[in-house]
Amino acid sequence: MFIWIFLSAAVIMVNKYVLSMSGFPYPVALTCTHMGFCSILAFVLVKGGFVEAVNITADTYLSCILPIGLLFAGTLWLGNAAYLYLSVSFIQMLKASMPMVVFVVGVGFATEKFTLRAAINMVVVGTGIAIASYGEIHFVVVGVLLQVGSIATESVRLTLVQILLQKRGIKMNPVSTLYHIAPCCFVFLFLPFIYIELPKMVNDPNLNVNIPLLLLSAACAFALNMSVFLLIGKTSALTMNIAGVIKDWLLILLSVVLYGSTVTRTQLFGYGLAFLGVMYYNYAKVEQMKASAAAAQKAPEKQPLVESGDQGKSDNA
């Protein structure tokens, strides 16, 4: 858990430094570096026999992997671009709206069931985010729109993963996921890089391409994906949610200490309100998962005994 918290915080803080302070304000180029690095490492691990990759058909690749890769590219691009305008602390506060957006998207795609209790909970989260935004001293509309766009694309991506991959029974570990998704994500990012950022970089007299720093950022991103796999495999969903909360508060503190970000009392109150809403949402989801697991275990006990001669009827029912 502590490794995941450390790596997650490291990725965000390093990206903020690269984009805002090191003379490399090009989020698409940075994200391309990440995806290229992850693609190469995943390819080496799979082809070297260290990890087994799930076989994907052409139809599945076109209908599942490509849309998810496109949305993932949008999430990374917009999320990294937001660091050019907003502080790490404020971005973490905005990210607290993720459960609310995922819920809305899930209701739209029929993967989430609308309930009045869940809707009220989402209103509480939204109110907290609004108060935190009102208290932000360095509020930049462009940065907020970029971060909101990143949250929206990530919410749709998570919903599509649930719909497209789970319905097809496809389960992939992080290396296998990067092996299939990172290359197409790289292609989707490389096109805007060529036409949007590359001309600016060529004519930028202040450009500072710190290769070791870029590789460090990419290595942290790859390690973060691996730590997610270990965290999910070794701990419960509740532990991961608690780890996420610790990470968010840690990042807000690091943003204040290392980068001098200003956090007002109004922001803390708003984020605290949203935090309570998110914690209740996580608790409700975990309880729902426990109830579903318990129901699945009891289901076989309720099935009537079947004589051997009636087995065919039972299988057809």
Image (tube, rainbow, N blue to C red):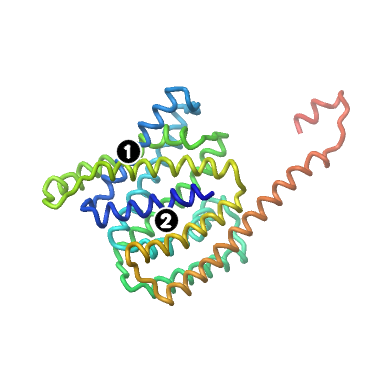
- Which residue is more in the foreground, 1 or 119? 1
Q: Residue at x 57, y 65 (%)?
A: 119
Which of the 4 image quadrants contains residue 241?
Answer: bottom right
Q: Residue at x 32, y 63 (%)?
A: 259
Quarter of the C terminus within the rendering:
top right
- Which residue is more in the foreground, 160 or 3? 3
How crowded pointer 2 is (Cα within 10 Å; few <14, some 14-19, many 20+) is rated as many
Q: Which mark is residue 186?
A: 1
* Residue type pointed to by label 1: Phe
* Visible residue check, residue 222: yes
- Which residue is more in the foreground, 52 or 239? 239
- Which residue is more in the foreground, 175 or 192? 175
Give the total of numbered labels.
2
Q: Residue at x 37, y 43 (%)?
A: 70
* Residue type pointed to by label 2: Ile
Instruction: Give the residue pinned by disc 2.
Output: 151
Asked if residue 173 lies left or right of residue 147, the reply is: right
From the viewer's perspective, is residue 73 above or below residue 134? above
Q: In the structure shown, which secondary structural element does the residue marked by tag 1 occupy?
A: helix
